[in-house]
Image (tube, coloured by chain):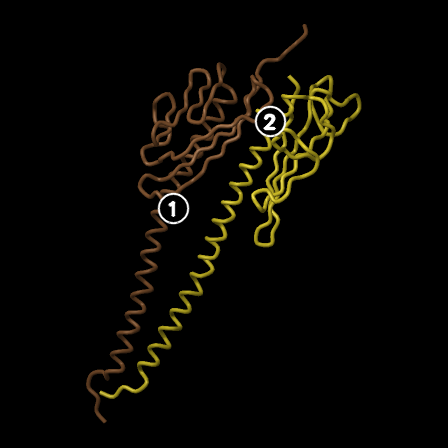
Amino acid sequence: MTRRGFTLVELVVVIGLSGLIFVVVSGLTVSLLTVGTKNRHQQTLEQARDDVTSDISNIVKWREGILAWDNNRLQVGDVVYEKSGDRFLKNGVSLLGENVVVTEMGIENYSALEDYPSLIVGLKIESRVLPQVKDEIKLVVSRRKTTIETDL
Amino acid sequence: MMRKGALLLEIVISLVILGMVSAVFFPAIVTLVKRSHQLKHAAVAAAILQEGMEATYNVFLSGWSGWEEGVYHPVVVVGPGTKHWTLISGEETALETRFTRRLEISNICRNPRTGDIRPNCGNGESIDEYSRLVTETVIWSESGQTRQLTTSWVVAKI
């Protein structure tokens, strides 16, 4: 028996398999691209978290001067942190960059000492470009005592 | 042209190649996911450790006496109009569902001549009443393995 070309069944099977492979590969490609973009924005938020944590920690621990706060503002000496709209400012300048949005801010004090607060600073942040990428900053920092009391 | 069984052979070969590729990539993907979870847990543990250090510093600043050698953990005491840190005996478990935190407070000895400090007193050394050694450990379990972060610091009465 001589055969030329393919049978209908062979063609249907090949088309079916090709379709299956296309669906799997395109699904994987899309999810890889999405994960890549998500990771990049997640890294931006992590960087923002590290920057804020280290900045506020150092200032609260060691900066001299008045220490005052409410839910959207923290003042330590001549340094003022505040949530203004969806941005987080340090002395009027954005601390987190343009692509990070601050959705919530809150400060609580867990110290029995008036002069040496132990603050819990909470910030909820998200990516401006990809709002489903979110992060939460919870920073605990106690003001340091830098003067030695002596009876001499 | 005669073709008999070629299509089946091709499919079998394709499946074998697909299997081999999957066998190479699957463990790599599993490792990446596992590593990502490990990093996340380590970051949470570091935050818990940091919180313990800050709370302990504030507690010692609020009142130096009354903290005998032993294991403690920080808690927030809520009073009328105030909240403040204190330490209570024992370790804290199920923190963030998986972490255990313990703060061990110990006396330290100081050499009056050199000022050096160490846990056990040697000749001519005595317990330093103005310093305490705090060792904080955060322990968690992950994929059947126990992991921990530890830090030690000396608090001084000033």
**Mark 2 sits on what residue?**
B84
Q: Residue, x 19% and y 86% (percent of image)?
A: A4
Q: Residue at x 76, y 23 (%)?
A: B127
Q: Position of residue A130 (x, y in %)?
A: 33, 43
Which residue is nearer to you in this view: B141 or A1? B141
User: Outermost residue toward the bottom?
Assistant: A1
- Cα distance in 3D space between marks 2 and 1: 38 Å
Mark 2: which secondary structure? strand
Q: Count residues near mark 2 (Cα–Cα under 10 Å), then give few for <14, some for 14-19, many for 20+.
A: many
Residue extending furthest toward the right: B123
Which residue, given by chain and number where applicable, does mark 1 sit on?
A39
Is B53 placed left or right of A59 in the picture? right
**Disc ID at residue B152:** none
Are discs 2 and 1 located on one and the same chain? no
In what element is the residue under mark 1? helix
* Residue A116 position (above or below residue A33): above
Q: Which chain is yellow?
A: B
